[in-house]
């Protein structure tokens, strides 16, 4: 919801404290009042009825503070259509109830009511059936995920009616993105999901909802959502006449290639063609924000099915349209190979279309940071991947097995503790080649001693789809467990994450005694087994009485934290027989404040897993 165009009609002026709260939360609000309330941006009026037409026309969001009946009578003469009317809320004079009155979905009044209710500590009164039953808001779903809803108002209303009446509906998802993942997670019982159109038994369903760039012949009532996932590569003769070409390309996309023009996301060409009028004409035709320009050298490195000597001689690359489409799609899938056209003399052009690589339904590997140990400290995204994964390969004793309990029924869960790198890759590739989802679960955050670099080298070598979901590191868990801030104004402004030198050599410039000269907060990983050496190096720069926290299995059920000074750090580690999953924190930032608060108040203890 935009917050620059809000009107507040102060029908009831009993609760000016609430008005002040709204004004602070929404600083661009315009207040209409019949008496001076000494708020900025206030317009005095004799009658709300006299200004209602102007308010309705000029504002996209309207709040009526007063009785619901008054609100209805004020707006009734001006209500036209849900696709054009502003969002209208009614708030009672106490702020207890926030009621979306008009444009609940399209105008966003339902969402806005929830937000304002949270601001005021009130109750949103939502009457829209789909919202109350947890159903998708189909009329705003496209806008949420950047999809173009390819349906007229009548079709949209028919589909929404069938949807809320829980008629049998087929959902086709032949691409994948954040929105399709949401639909898969939240699918109502009367929806069946398909990933290939030819698998849908059409007589079983009354409606087809499809998130796809493809056009499918069907007799079903269909609501298409068009994701922006197609990349149009274009080449042409110098100063090619533009008349008719954009329309011809669009017509061919629809009729010959069965692709929606609304899914075109980029237009790409070679640098020598950037001033061609055809590009501007295509940009306008397909409503593309900008043209992507590549050098001939960039395009030359792309393998294409139809290279040619003509562009090689003219611009220095054997392909413009195919290479441009593939490069802008991140080397995705070429849906339309090079097409040649000529509508008039001197008007030779070529075009190709590729599908974004990241939306292709294929195998995928998600490298997930498990967090420090507590299953509730994995990220929401990481948890979702664990719940959806077909294979979870977790880092043995470094990751609590409890995290794998998020796995769905039928998922394969394996520890990599006894596997070498080749064995780990082999099992991941086995599942990947079957088009399945693999989660590689690493302790903490994968970027800190996660050993993911060599794995990603394998993924790159085999041109595999992968992504990283970050996690909470144990140094953050240490700060939380110690109730400490690891930076102190004017004293310590740097946190160093490092390790001691054991079997893995350290660069000379990163030797511990050199890093310690900064007197920063030092978080030392993987070093309990060489703690005497670590202590000796640190004592070259830190005073012996420097505070130390020896943190074992942070956030695990058997977590232990030992406080000591630097001169006793090695003794503390040895006496308590600490080895793996031990983090050493060194520095005066530990507990650096007057008085230590309790770990957490007794009344909130039930919220923590221990």
Image (cartoon, grey):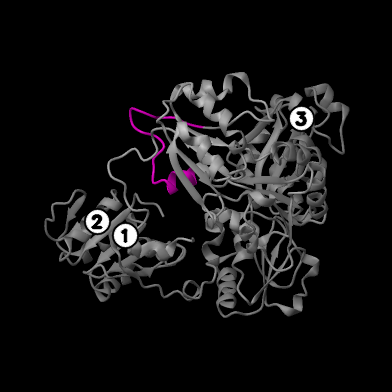
- Is residue 350 in sight in this rendering? no
Magenta segment: 476-496
Q: Earlier in the sequence, mark 3 or mark 1?
A: 1
Q: Is residue 306 left or right of residue 485?
A: right
Q: Is residue 488 magenta?
A: yes
Label 2, label 1: how far apart the Cα atoms are: 8 Å
Label 2: how many residues lie within 10 Å, few (<14), some (14-19) or many (20+)? few
Foreground of the two, 69 or 460 = 460
Q: How far apart in space, not on screen, are marks 3 and 1 (Cα)?
A: 52 Å
Disc 2: which residue? 21
Q: Which mark, by number, is residue 560?
A: none
Label whose residue precedes the other's in the sequence (2 or 1): 2
Q: Which mark is residue 299?
A: 3
Q: Nearer the viewer, mark 3 or mark 1?
A: 1
Rendered image quadrant of residue 81: bottom left
Q: Which residue is mark 1?
A: 119
Q: Quadrant of residue 528?
A: top right
Up-down: is 221 above or below 235? below
């Amino acid at each position: 919801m935009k917050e620059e165009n809000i009107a507040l009609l102060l029908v009831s002026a009993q609760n000016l404290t609430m008005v002040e709260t709204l004004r602070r939360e929404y600083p661009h609000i315009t207040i209409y009042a019949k008496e001076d309330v000494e708020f900025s941006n206030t317009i005095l009026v004799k009658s709300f009825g006299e200004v209602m037409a102007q308010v309705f026309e000029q504002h996209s969001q309207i709040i009526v503070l007063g009785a619901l009946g008054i609100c209805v009578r004020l707006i009734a003469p001006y209500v036209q259509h849900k696709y054009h009317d502003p969002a209208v809320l009614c708030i009672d004079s106490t702020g207890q109830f926030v009621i979306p009155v008009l444009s609940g979905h399209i105008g966003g009044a339902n969402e806005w009511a929830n937000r304002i209710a949270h601001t005021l500590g009130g109750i949103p009164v939502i009457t829209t059936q789909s919202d109350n039953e947890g159903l998708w808001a189909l009329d705003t779903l496209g806008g949420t995920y950047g999809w173009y809803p390819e349906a007229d108002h009548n079709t949209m209303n028919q589909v929404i009616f069938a949807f809320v009446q829980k008629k049998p509906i087929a959902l086709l998802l032949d691409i994948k993105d954040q929105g399709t993942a949401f639909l898969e997670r939240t699918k109502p019982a009367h929806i069946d999901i398909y990933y290939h159109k030819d698998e849908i038994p059409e007589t079983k369903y009354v409606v087809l909802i499809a998130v796809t760039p493809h056009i499918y012949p069907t007799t079903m009532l269909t609501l298409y959502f068009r994701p922006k996932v197609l990349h149009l590569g274009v080449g042409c003769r110098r100063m090619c006449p533009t008349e008719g070409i954009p329309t011809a390309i669009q017509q061919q996309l629809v009729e010959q290639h069965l692709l929606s023009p609304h899914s075109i996301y980029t237009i790409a060409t070679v640098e020598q063609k950037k001033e061609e009028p055809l590009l501007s004409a295509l940009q306008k035709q397909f409503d593309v924000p900008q043209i992507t320009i590549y050098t001939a050298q960039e395009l030359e490195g792309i393998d294409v099915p139809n290279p040619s000597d003509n562009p090689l001689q003219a611009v220095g690359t054997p392909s413009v349209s195919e290479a441009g489409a593939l490069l802008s799609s991140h080397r995705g899938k070429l849906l339309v190979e090079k097409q040649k056209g000529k509508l008039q003399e001197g008007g030779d052009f070529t075009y190709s279309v590729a599908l974004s690589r990241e939306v292709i339904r294929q195998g995928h590997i998600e490298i997930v940071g498990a967090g420090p140990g507590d299953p509730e400290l994995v990220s929401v995204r990481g948890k979702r991947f664990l719940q959806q994964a077909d294979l979870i390969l977790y880092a043995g004793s470094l990751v609590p097995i409890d995290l794998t309990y998020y796995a769905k029924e039928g998922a394969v869960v394996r520890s990599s503790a006894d596997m070498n790198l080749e064995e780990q890759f082999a099992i991941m590739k086995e599942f990947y080649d079957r088009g399945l989802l693999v989660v590689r679960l690493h302790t903490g955050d994968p970027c800190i001693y996660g050993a993911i670099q060599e794995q990603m080298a394998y993924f790159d070598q085999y041109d595999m789809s992968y992504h990283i979901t970050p996690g909470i590191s144990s140094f953050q868990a240490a700060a939380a467990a110690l109730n400490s801030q690891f930076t102190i104004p004017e004293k310590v402004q740097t946190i160093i994450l490092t390790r001691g030198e054991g079997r893995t050599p350290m660069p000379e410039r990163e030797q511990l005694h050199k890093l310690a000269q900064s007197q920063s907060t030092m978080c030392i990983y993987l070093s309990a087994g060489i703690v005497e050496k670590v202590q000796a190096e640190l004592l070259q720069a830190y005073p012996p009485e420097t505070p130390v926290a020896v943190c074992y299995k942070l956030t695990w059920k058997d977590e232990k934290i030992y406080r000591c000074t630097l001169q006793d750090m090695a003794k503390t580690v040895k006496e308590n027989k600490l080895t793996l999953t031990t983090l050493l924190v060194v520095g005066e930032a530990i507990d650096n404040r007057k008085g230590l608060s309790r770990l957490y108040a007794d009344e909130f203890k039930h919220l923590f897993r221990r």
